[in-house]
Image (tube, grey):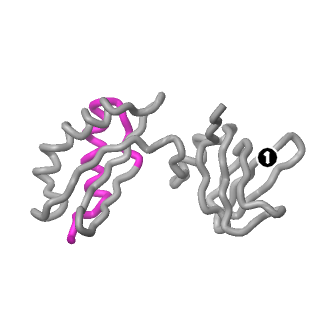
Amino acid sequence: MKVKPLEEIKELCRKIAEKIGVSVEDVEFKGGDYPAITVYIDKKGGVDLDTCEKMSKLLDGPFDELDPTFGEPYSLNVSSVGIDRPFKTDEDFLSHIGELVEVRLKNSVKGKKFFDGELLSYDKKAITVKTDEKTTLTFDLKNVVKVNEYIDFE
């Protein structure tokens, strides 16, 4: 199925999101038997179901006008980015410096593929994480599978 450029769809969503105080973090298109466009939103303090519903309703008309799938049927989904959303952009990394993060690696370092600790730095090629009071590790981003906020289940 042919779909308009995701950046064009994202830009439309951003303009609408501003009206209700949320940010558009990502837009995905999945084809197949049940094509869907999913808009991922976020805001300080998190996103609840009512906010997702409100955003979805605000997108209905503009999406009809944009016709992102050139007349082909699709589902429009609006979702929170989720608590374990992976960092994708420079802004994601930079906005979490000084905070606790979880790091998952392709290849083990010091016999481990999973670390958590304070994100100390990011420079597009590597991140540095303070894993405990005595250990600071730098991970090449080519070896990083996923970085996200630290989730404390206690």
For disc 1, the marked residue is 131
**Taking 65 as reference, is 35 above or below it?**
below
Q: Is residue 51 magenta?
A: no
Left-right relation of 120 to 67: right
* Quarter-of-image position of residue 146: bottom right
Amino acid under disc 1: Thr
Q: Position of residue 40 (x, y in %)?
A: 37, 46
Quadrant that contains the C terminus: top right
Q: Is residue 23 magenta?
A: yes
- Between 33 and 141, the one lying in front of the other is 33
- Between 85 and 7, the one lying in front of the other is 85
Which residue does the image show at 54% across and 46% down from the upper left? 84
- Between 152 and 145, the one lying in front of the other is 152
* Quarter-of-image position of residue 23: top left
Q: Position of residue 62 (x, y in %)?
A: 15, 46
Which residue does the image show at 16% across and 44% down from the upper left? 60
Quadrant that contains the N terminus: bottom left
Q: Position of residue 22 (x, y in %)?
A: 36, 35
Q: Position of residue 132 (x, y in %)?
A: 83, 43
Which residue does the image show at 73% across and 52% down from the upper left? 115
Please provide the residue range marked out in magenta.
1-25
Element class at badge 1: loop
Left-right relation of 101 to 86: right
Q: Residues within 10 Å of mark 1 (few under 14, many from 20)?
A: some
- Between 55 and 53, the one lying in front of the other is 53
Which residue does the image show at 60% across and 43% down from the upper left? 149
Left-right relation of 122 to 91: right
